[in-house]
Image (cartoon, helix red, strand yellow):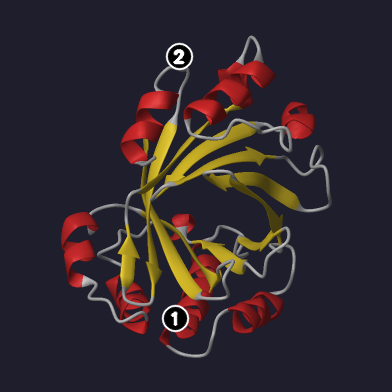
Amino acid sequence: MGVADLLAVTATLDAPRIFERSVKLSQGRLSDDRGLVSMGRRALYPAPRTTLAELCAALGCNDCTALLPHLAAAHAVHFGADDGIGKCYLEFAPDTAPAPDLVFLALKWAGTDKRLNRYTSVTHQSHDAKAALVAGLVPAGPVRDAMLACLDLARDGDPDRTAVVLHVTETGSPRASVDISVADARLTLADAAGLIAPVFAGFGLDPAPFLDAHGAARFGHIAAGMDSTGAAFATLYFGARQL
């Protein structure tokens, strides 16, 4: 299941949708059959629970019951494809979140394996605390350095000089990462090449083909940390557009 399947399945909804691309980097490997389709919860009406279950099933997950109790509290829903992995995220406003500072609750699956991820906002914490979170989750080296530079970029580009940052964890696994929004800096990937290139180099990858193909796209956010096996990774999100 990849981006083509994701777009075909979500095209059955007669509602405004946003599509964002991403690329995931790990040691010696680049995964780019990835994307996210986002919509308001009302896109699932008139039967939101049934529609959510049907869309998840069409994307390869026949049991999304972990999300259903929280659907009514969500204000947006996101469906993702990640090189064979399917994803469904519920997004919450602060006053309806099922746990303090929880922004996203995500179910991710590959075959019969399903994982629940929580994206918790640390935006309200100090800039130094956010930097400490990056240092604690991203191994020392060029990827950590790039993430810290992106953290400063996120702060400096934000209207109130507050970097929007999420701490991501997965139930039952060591997966943990930090996600930094750089959207308010209004940079293209080409503009941010000096930050992006070291991330690629840190995983033994050449950034040139990626930047040649996508340099004009808007840089959205960047994540890095450890996956469920304990291996380091980084992900760049870019090119969000209305469908």
Estimate the x, y position of residue 182 in percent, counting from the top left: 47, 61
User: Which residue appears at 44% of the width and 63% of the height?
Assistant: 235
Say whether residue 164 is left or right of residue 84. Answer: right
Tell me the element at label 2: loop
As measured in the structure, the alpha-carbon distance from the residue carrying label 1 to the one carrying label 2 is 40 Å
Estimate the x, y position of residue 187 in percent, counting from the top left: 35, 60
Quadrant into which the N terminus falls: top left
Q: Is residue 73 visible?
A: no
Residue 161 falls in which quadrant of the image?
bottom right
Identify residue type, mark 1: Val
Say whether residue 97 is left or right of residue 115. Answer: right
Residue at the bottom extreme? 140
**Nearer the N terminus, badge 1 or badge 2?**
2
Give the residue at mark 1: 143
Q: Is residue 97 visible?
A: yes
Q: Residues within 10 Å of mark 1 (few under 14, many from 20)?
A: many
Is there a contact, CB below 8 Å, between mark 1 and mark 2? no
